[in-house]
Amino acid sequence: MAPRKGRNLSADQKFSVVVDSLSGGYKTVGQMVYAVLKEAILTGAFAPGEWLRQESLAEAIGVSRIPVRTALLQLESEGMITFHPHRGARVRTLTSEQVDEIYRLRTLLEVYALRRAVESMTPERLEKLSAIAKQLDAQDEGGEFLEIRIAFYRTLYDAERNPLLVEMIEDLRSHVGRYFLAIRFAQHAHHHAAVVKQIAKGDIAGAEEWLTKHLDQVRLGIRDLIAEDSADEAPAAVEENSRRPARKRATKPRAKATNSARRGVLTS
């Protein structure tokens, strides 16, 4: 799922866009580097689980390694990346348990939001919703797909009348991250036009069932990606550990046989 170490960031278009858009207007280089890296994580230019090499980042942004290191430490304190001994920094990814919890909460809130919104549905909003649904179902995955989907659910849940409720839903959605949200899971596809038709017919139970199944299948799709990445990561970790120099064994005689039980294995 996530690109590994050695990625050529200087030639990466997504990261270049972030750098170009945020390279000016800051008082210090450190503030600029921090803003660039944070934006790259939030927008999905850096995928969950991706390794971040300080040398590549510094070269791509056009700065020294010092502000990059400082920015990474700040991002670690905010829980956006993690440092691994002997390996470097990595964009934080969700666990399967965290994904399950997020989608349990989303289902509770969004089914409630659907019920409230349907009660105040107007022909004008239904027509707008239908137009957005057709556009959304025809859109490939990516940033534009994500923006259209946000517009669809804001219209569906009537964000103007339920601003706090929609804000809570979007906050939960943001916990998943734009990288996952911008992916269209073909094997779990649900056409959004279908739920609009159910609402138009007054089939609220059918609309709730569609929404519940849709959220659950997206949850399963994200879990699959996380599991796939974990499986890919295990062989890479073994290979990297095999390249490390072996630790020198102590030559000092052991005073007691029980000392052998005290020797541990160095792990990262």
Image (spheres, rainbow, N blue to C red):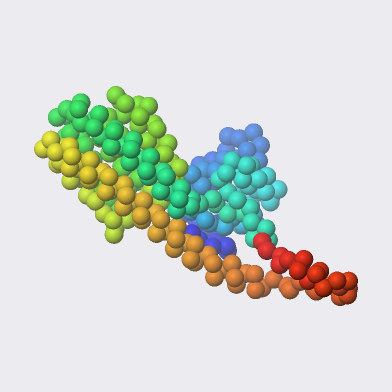
Instruction: Give the residue displayed 41% in from the left and 56% down from the top.
Output: 223
Query: x, y (%) of residue 78?
Result: 59, 41
Q: Quadrant of the N terminus?
A: bottom left
Q: Is residue 195 left or right of residue 7?
A: left
Q: Is residue 264 visible?
A: yes
Instruction: Give the residue displayed 38% in from the left and 40% down from the top.
Output: 105
Q: Locate residue 252: give its quadrant.
A: bottom right
Instruction: Give the residue displayed 17% in from the left and 27% down from the top.
Output: 122
- In terms of depth relative to the viewer, which is nearer, 249 or 22? 249
Relative to 86, say whether 70 is above or below.
above
Q: How many marks?
A: 0
- In terms of depth relative to the viewer, which is nearer, 31 or 172? 172
Relative to 217, say whether 163 is above or below.
above
Name the outermost residue toward the left. Answer: 201
Q: Is residue 261 left or right of residue 215?
A: right
Q: Locate residue 56: give its quadrant.
A: bottom right
Q: Quadrant of the C terminus?
A: bottom right
- In terms of depth relative to the viewer, which is nearer, 23 or 162? 162
Query: x, y (%) of residue 74?
Result: 64, 42
Query: x, y (%) of residue 173?
Result: 40, 41
Instruction: Give the residue displayed 24% in from the left and 30% down from the top.
Output: 117
Q: Locate residue 52: give its quadrant.
A: bottom right
Name the outermost residue toward the top. Answer: 161
Query: x, y (%) of residue 19?
Result: 54, 46
Relative to 225, say whether 259 is above or below.
below
Q: Is residue 130 visible?
A: no
